């Protein structure tokens, strides 16, 4: 009986940690839902981090820390450099040095260009956001969340 109770508690704790580590939401938007041939538009991607968690910024101040990385791909489009917001320095009990992290809602942006010779009246592309979520005491395995965005082509 003791084993069953211990096992049940263990499974419950793992499931809570798994849900917490996966709680970040990723969304994105294309201004006006459309892109023009031969023009660039800045697309935004938002990472919502629940209270009590943080993720390393794209420059986390430690060589062994996993940086947040946003990668747009596909759709026959061209993508420019991602603009990452500045993180903020925060000290945690497990490190004497401050780490650079994101908390709450974080917005990234990048330019998308439709080639002048683009064929078709719509485009779909993907954005991957790789991050490592942590509490003040433990870090979860890195995750990559992917979203698809679409736009009319004018």
Image (spheres, grey):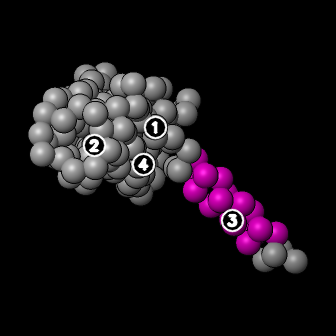
Residue drawn 34% across the image and 45% down it = 122
Residue bearing the label numbered 3: 10
Residue bearing the label numbered 2: 70
The Cα atoms of the two marked residues, 2 and 4, are separated by 11 Å
Could you say whether the residue bearing mark 3 is in a helix, strand or loop? Answer: helix
Between disc 3 and disc 4, the foreground one is 4
Indicate left or right for 79 with 133 as reference: left
Residue drawn 36% across the image and 25% down it = 31
Check disc 2: other Cα within 10 Å, few if <14, some if 14-19, many if 20+. many
Residue 72 drawn above or below residue 1: above
Q: Residue 91 placed where, x, y %?
A: 35, 27
Q: In terms of image quadrants, where is residue 109? A: top left
Looking at this view, name the residue that lies furthest to the right: 1
Indicate left or right for 80 with 109 as reference: left
Residue bearing the label numbered 4: 147
Taking the image as drawn, is residue 24 in sight? yes
């Amino acid at each position: 009986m003791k084993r069953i109770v211990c096992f049940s508690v263990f499974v419950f704790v793992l499931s809570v940690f798994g849900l917490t580590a996966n709680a970040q939401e990723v969304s994105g938007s294309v201004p006006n839902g459309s892109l023009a041939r031969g023009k660039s538009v800045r697309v935004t991607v938002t990472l919502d981090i629940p209270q009590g968690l943080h993720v390393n910024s794209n420059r986390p101040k430690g060589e062994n820390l996993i940086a947040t990385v946003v990668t747009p791909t596909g759709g026959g489009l061209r993508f420019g450099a991602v603009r990452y917001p500045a993180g903020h320095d925060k000290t945690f009990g497990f490190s004497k040095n401050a780490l650079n992290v994101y908390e709450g809602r974080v917005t990234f942006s990048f330019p998308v260009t439709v080639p002048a010779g683009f064929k078709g009246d719509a485009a779909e592309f993907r954005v991957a956001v790789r991050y490592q979520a942590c509490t003040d005491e433990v870090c979860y395995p890195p995750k990559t969340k992917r979203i698809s965005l679409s736009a009319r082509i004018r």
